[in-house]
Amino acid sequence: MRSRVPISLTNFNTFSTIYFELEDIPQYQMVESAYLFLEVDGDMTGTGFRCYLNEGYNYGLQNDSLANRSYDYQHYNENEIMIDISEIFFALASRVKENNGIIIEYGDNYFYSCQMIVVYRQEIIAPKCKGMTFFEKKISVSSSGNNAVSPFFLTANATTVTFCVSNLGDYPIVVSIENSPDARNILEDPQRIEILPNVMGVIIPTYFTKYVRIRVTSNYNGIGTEVWYQSQQK
């Protein structure tokens, strides 16, 4: 799964500064890789750009992020480039470095738009319950936006699955279930439940599939939930 994130871009004579808030990226802790997608005012000059965190945090020449003219997801034309900033993103997400923005040295080029593209890892919780008939896992499903999703749960050996969801936020939420045979293709469950603030709701999958997860949405930004996944095993 990937998502495009609008960010701020400021151009100067020979470099640009880029800034984004981690909290504006839903579930930023689950990001597997991050890229800057920039539009350039004309043909690219040179083979790449130096890209590093602001305030003296420089990875050095051996780790400079080079701009690629094409990328696996999509082919871009000569005025659109992609820069891999995964290492920089992880340094910010782990709070190892303070977020003062990113600097790109571009020489004669000028960027007139920029977006961040983040690719999420597929996180799967596989119950380990040898010799047991019951499994329980408590997790948090939260977002600063209006949409959040849990990891997939492996349900291949489960006979019964139940999600108990407690709404810790200030606004009503809607909880739905997403079924999947391979943790990639999604089959939406017909059930939807609305949960008011400080209330717990229960939802059970209608279909049986190998993987299952929940999605939480709201008409307002700011989602906070505690989720109990409970299953009876064969």
Image (tube, helix red, strand yellow):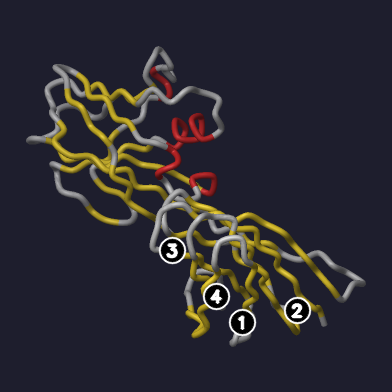
Identity of the residue drawn at 54% across and 53% down: 142
Would you place residue 73 above or below residue 15 in this image? below
Q: CA distance from mark 3 to mark 1?
A: 20 Å
Identify the secondary structure beneath mark 2.
loop
Looking at the image, is mark 3 or mark 1 nearer the viewer? 3
Measured as percent of width and height from the top left, residue 14 is found at 17, 17
- Discs 1, 2 touching: Cβ within 8 Å: no
Between circles 4 and 2, the one closer to the viewer is 4
What x and y, as percent, mark residue 211?
Answer: 61, 73
Q: Residue at x 63, y 85 (%)?
A: 208
Q: Nearer the viewer, residue 218 or 83?
A: 218
Query: Do residues under tags 2 and 3 come within 8 Å of each other at their CB atoms?
Result: no
Give me the residue at 70% from left, 65% from top. Answer: 228
Say which element carries label 1. Answer: loop
The residue that mark 1 highlights is: 205
Q: Earlier in the sequence, mark 2 or mark 3?
A: 2
Q: Which residue is mark 4?
A: 177
**Is 81 in front, or is 215?**
215
Tell me the distance, in whole angstroms, between the alpha carbons under discs 4 and 2. 18 Å
Which residue is denoted by mark 3 in the rendering?
A: 218
Question: Do callouts 1 and 4 mark residues in contact (Cβ within 8 Å)?
Answer: yes
10 Å neighbourhood of mark 1: few (<14), some, or many (≥20)?
many
